[in-house]
Amino acid sequence: MPYNFINIFAGAVKTITIPSIQRDYAQGRKNLKVNRIRHKFLDALFNAVNGKNIKLDFVYGDLDKNGNLTPLDGQQRLTTLFLLYWYASKKENIPADETGFLKNFSYETRPDSRIFCKELIKFTPKSIEQNLSEEIADQSWFSLSWRKDPTISAMLTMIDAINEKFHSVKNLWQKLANIEFYFLPIENLGLTDEIYITMNSRGKQLTDFEHFKAEFKRRLDDIDAELSKKIILRIDREWTDMLWKVAVRNESYLVDDYFLNYFRFLCDLEIYKSGGIPKKDRDFFVLLDEFFSGNVKNKIAELKKNFECWCECGDTYKFFGDRVLIGSKMDKFPKHAAGKFVGYFQMKTDGNFFADCLKLYDGKLGKFLMLYAFLIYLRNKNTIQDSDFRRRIRIVNNLIGNSEDEIRESAMSTLLQQVEQIIKFGKFLNLNNKQNFNAVQIQEEKLKLEWTQENSELAESLFELEDHYLLYGQIAIIGLDAPQNFKRFISLFKCDYDLIDCTLLGKSDYFQNRKKLYQFGSKFSRSWQNLFHLNLKNEHFEDTKNTLRDFLEEQENFTDDFLRKTIDEYLRNCEKESFFEWNYYYIKYKEFRPARYGKYIWEDFQAAPYMFSALWTEQRKSEKAYLPFLRAAVDAETFKNHYNSTLMRLEFEKYFIECENDAYVIKEIETGNLIDRLKINQDNGIDTEDRILKFKNWYNQL
């Protein structure tokens, strides 16, 4: 039978004593985790006194022949009930003959705790409205040292929390009868200190998962006790076994955390699908509030499917390993394997999106969408052929990898719909003006899907190109009309990036620009990735594409030696013809090509092609930006000591040197008056002499 805190003393139990070996009272501790637990427990008790009866879990322990109960489990609940009954008795001035049972509850963890409980029962606050803990601490019987006692300190915190929660409840004393618990006596067990140390070690607290499962069960019991029993059994057996296998492979044993991480993912999924945005850092009580709103039985059915599909999947590492390779955009070593796609995600596991979520669910939207795609497949395995899935998941991967600006929380509802449509049917939703993946990429994926169906013998060659770390899914820079260039592209970009940059610029102005900011290739992968991904804000993407296409037509396979010969031939022709465009200087002098992001600024490319600055970062404002025509003209030490990056000039004691489109000029520091001007001979605005060599000869004579 259930008991409340009054009638338990009416039977065989005469006193309740918390033994010295038990841990301190913990529900009043002041930390974030305990705060959440305390408030949720008080919320449950508050609901009970307002009409919704509650039955707490079992309290059990040793009941000796004298009727003294020594709890083995239930200390925290009993202590909170003791404090709640004490509060109600003082709040409503309950007569002493009705509250005498409170004296039968005692703490033995420390002598101070025992004395405090006795004095507390005798004490009556002046006003229940004020800060009770402070009034208690001001009493003559309250020792200053007690503030450092963890149990007493926690009790004071709980008293204030109870006061805050229950001060407006009328007839609280009578309503406390709605709070019941079950009691299981273990008579004559003779609990020793060793048993307590083993079964309820001092300081050991329930994990978040244990609290979660207890609360989950309680709430589901109220809805369908039989269903609750079945689900809890699945959690404890099949689902935990499945999570354990993942955890062991992950060199981790935190199965409880794994469950909570996946449950959080599923709660976030539900919110995203409904068009909402989940709040970050929600505790598991809030997650349970979300889960147990709406049609709970439908949610339980979904929960079961979302766990069972992974149980049926078997070895998740084998499942993902057979379909996924994880690459790095910083690589110079392309990855590809038939039947797999290369994903470019920051992961704690090698391509196992499920294990990555379990180990550390970080809410990153790209990984979220990928895991959802796999989840949709596993839940529909009977209707989706494996070969179809491998083709479709590649499409999803390409869309995610090339929709960085489009993948936002506000768009997740439609993005999830699109992913589901692709995985289930291999088709695209017409979302009109709704938020969607990158429009350019969607169109490309549609074309590639048709192309691979018509050119199945070339499909693998296309997939290998897609997987390249410079493209990560978007092949617009190559196109589908010249499949012979797929492997040639891969061959070319095994070569030295700097040589590729110089070779292409010797062929044509292959760069792209946006509002005076120009993008070239460089020794950084990022610069080529910027060039190869169609950005509607950039101009001259087609120039890059055409230059690259024409060059790829020249060779089946490319080597560094071939590129060097091509570059040398270009430089010789320029020198032979005395025709020195700005490209010539860029290619000949390494100072024009910092090993950075390939960003340059021209104020007026057409009118002043020799007036540009090389940036050190990807941003327009760069403290280390410099004029290449000054940097290449002097030695490194001189440039380091005399270059003024703000004014873009070389400064010496009495004069400075700066560039013009057709000259170097030297002026006085103080007055700015012209001292000398080194004119560069030009024909129709193009140098007819190497201005770097001319400057060096001139500078050495200064």
Image (cartoon, grey):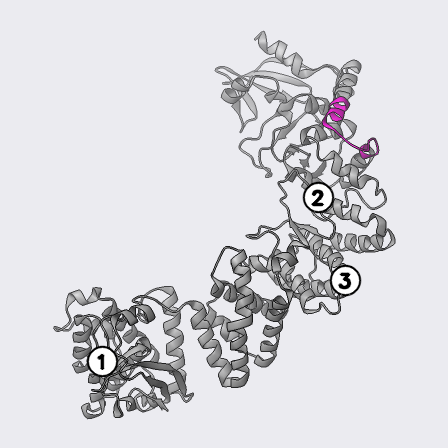
Circle 1 sits in a helix, a strand or a loop, which is it? loop
Q: Amino acid at mark 3?
A: Phe
Which span is picked out in magenta? 551-567
Within 10 Å of disc 1 (Cα), the crowding (few <14, some 14-19, many 20+) is few
Question: Quick one: label 3 or label 2, which is nearer the N terminus?
Answer: 3
Report the residue marked by disc 2.
468
Q: Which quadrant holds residue 110?
A: bottom left
Q: Amino acid at mark 1?
A: Ser
* 553 drawn magenta: yes
Residue 224, visible in the rendered structure: no
The C terminus: image quadrant: top right
Separation of marks 3 and 1 at Cα, in angstroms: 68 Å
Tell me residue 586's x, y (percent).
Answer: 68, 25
As drawn, is 589 to the left or to the right of 279?
Answer: right
Please give the label number shown on residue 495.
none
Report the residue marked by disc 3.
428
The N terminus: image quadrant: bottom left
Separation of marks 2 and 1 at Cα, in angstroms: 74 Å
Q: Amino acid at mark 2?
A: His
Mark 3 vs mark 2: in front? 2
Q: Is residue 1 above or below residue 118?
A: below
Mark 2 vs mark 1: in front? 2
Separation of marks 3 and 2 at Cα, in angstroms: 24 Å
As drawn, is 14 to the left or to the right of 181?
Answer: left
Residue nearest the viewer, comparing 451 with 575: 451
Tell me residue 58's x, y (percent).
Answer: 37, 82
Circle 2 sits in a helix, a strand or a loop, which is it? loop
Residue nearest the viewer, comparing 114 with 403: 114
Tell me residue 355's x, y (percent).
Answer: 57, 58
Report the residue marked by disc 1.
127
